[in-house]
Amino acid sequence: MATTRVTSNVITIERHILHEQEAFPDASGTLTQVLYDIALAGKLIASRTTRAGLADILGAAGQENVQGEEVQKLDLYAQQTIFQLNDHTGRLAVMASEEEQDLIHIPEQYPTGKYVLLFDPLDGSSNIDFNVSVGTIFAIYRRVSASGPGTLEDVLQKGSEIVAGGYVVYGSSTMLVYTAGHGVYGFTLDPSIGEFLLSHENIRLPDPPMYYSVNQGYEKYWTEGIKRYTRWLQGEEGASRSLSLRYIGSMVSDIHRTLLAGGVFYYPADTRDPKKPHGKLRLLYEANPMAYVIEQAGGYASTGRGPLRDVEPLDLHQRTPLFLGNRDLVEKAEEFIAKHDG
Ligand code: AHG
Ligand code: MN
Ligand code: MN
């Protein structure tokens, strides 16, 4: 009697990453291990987000972070989890996080390694108490310094140098989405077995796109070019079609939807806060990794004036305007900005 194979399509993230590694015979397996550690961090953080209201994990931790924002307890838990899973492995030269002012050095009792990890431990934290999806964002680079403790130069690398990047989205399901430069793969956490299983193979941005995603509450602070671009997305300014608006306020969720449904997500520079002339999102651990995923799925990411991943970083927490999604939609934003904003 033919037995149906019940495990034929069960591909865990570990098996997928190992299979990917086979294409690189000289690979040491270190990058594979770093990706494993990020998947483990995602499982640990997911275990808290799914019961945030019960585990005294809601609410503020009673301190401010480098961004001057109120730190949520889950921010701290996520930060500590990622740090403690990576500080002793000998795989990293240095880390940097949204939640830490300076470089995060490997404690001197541990060896350093050849990779650099940048991360936003919990993105969308302001939404936690309202049960809105949040996420973790990560970017992995090769160190550029020769050896010993990692340096600022190791961290301030252009997005075009990224080796692997992606995110974990803690939503109606927990998903890990990553790329190592050979397509974008999505894994859904099966809590009953504690495994991320391959659920989205080689994700490509759909065309035609479905949504545009921006916080229109700040419209009065936008430039003329951004205002007209938004009108165009709504079917005016000579557009041939209009898109529907979706904005969650958690970038990981907004970009995950853009990746799977097609569209454009943008957080433009605005005149609201003179201290933040380049908008709110951070280049190193928010914009660049998400740009890498979108571009590996056939899309494009821009500052509004040119390719985002060409920007030479000058500061750990530098902010940048961000437009990403279907290439034609993002290039249209560049067109409106060039035409109306000089
Ligand atoms: P974080 O929670 O890591 O500080 O990031 C929040 C970001 C991003 O997730 C989202 O797109 C943006 O803040 C929303 O900002 P607005 O509320 O100004 O739209
Ligand atoms: Mn963030
Ligand atoms: Mn954050």
Image (tube, rainbow, N blue to C red):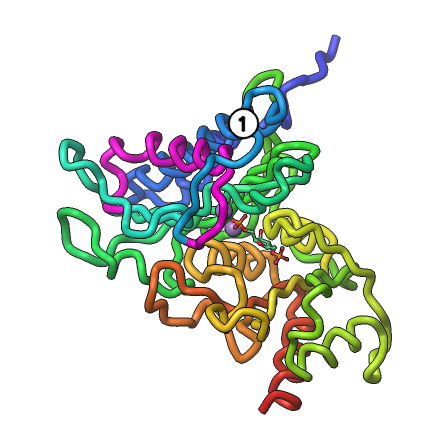
Q: Is residue 339 left or right of residue 33?
A: right
- Give the mark count: 1
Going by the numbered disc 1, the residue's amino acid type is: Ile
Looking at the picture, how far across and down is residue 65, in whole percent? 42, 47
Look at mark 1 in the image and give the residue it sits on.
Answer: 57
Mark 1: C-beta under 8 Å from nearest atom of ligand 3: no
Q: Is residue 241 left or right of residue 268?
A: right
| Rendered position, 197 above or below 246 | above
Residue under the point 29% across and 52% down:
102
| Rendered position, 51 above or below 36 | above
Looking at the picture, tell me which residue is in the foreground, 273 or 279.
273
**Magenta highlight range:** 67-94
Looking at the picture, how far across and down is residue 85, in whole percent? 35, 30
The quadrant in which residue 212 appears is bottom right
Looking at the picture, tell me which residue is in the foreground, 62 or 80.
62
Q: Is residue 175 visible?
A: yes
Looking at the picture, how far across and down is residue 332, in whole percent? 68, 78
Work out which residue is located at the far top of the displayed protein and give it.
1
**Mark 1, secondary structure of its residue:** loop
Looking at the picture, tell me which residue is in the foreground, 296 or 238.
238
Q: Is residue 19 visible?
A: no
Quadrant of the snapshot with the C terminus: bottom right
Is 61 within the magenta? no
Binning the other alpha carbons within 10 Å of mark 1 as few (below 14), some (14 to 19) or many (20 upward) gives many
Q: Is residue 317 left or right of residue 303?
A: left
Looking at the picture, how far across and down is residue 326, in whole percent? 67, 65
| Rendered position, 79 above or below 246 | above
Looking at the picture, tell me which residue is in the foreground, 18 or 99.
99
Q: Is residue 105 left or right of residue 265?
A: left
Residue under the point 85% across and 69% down:
242
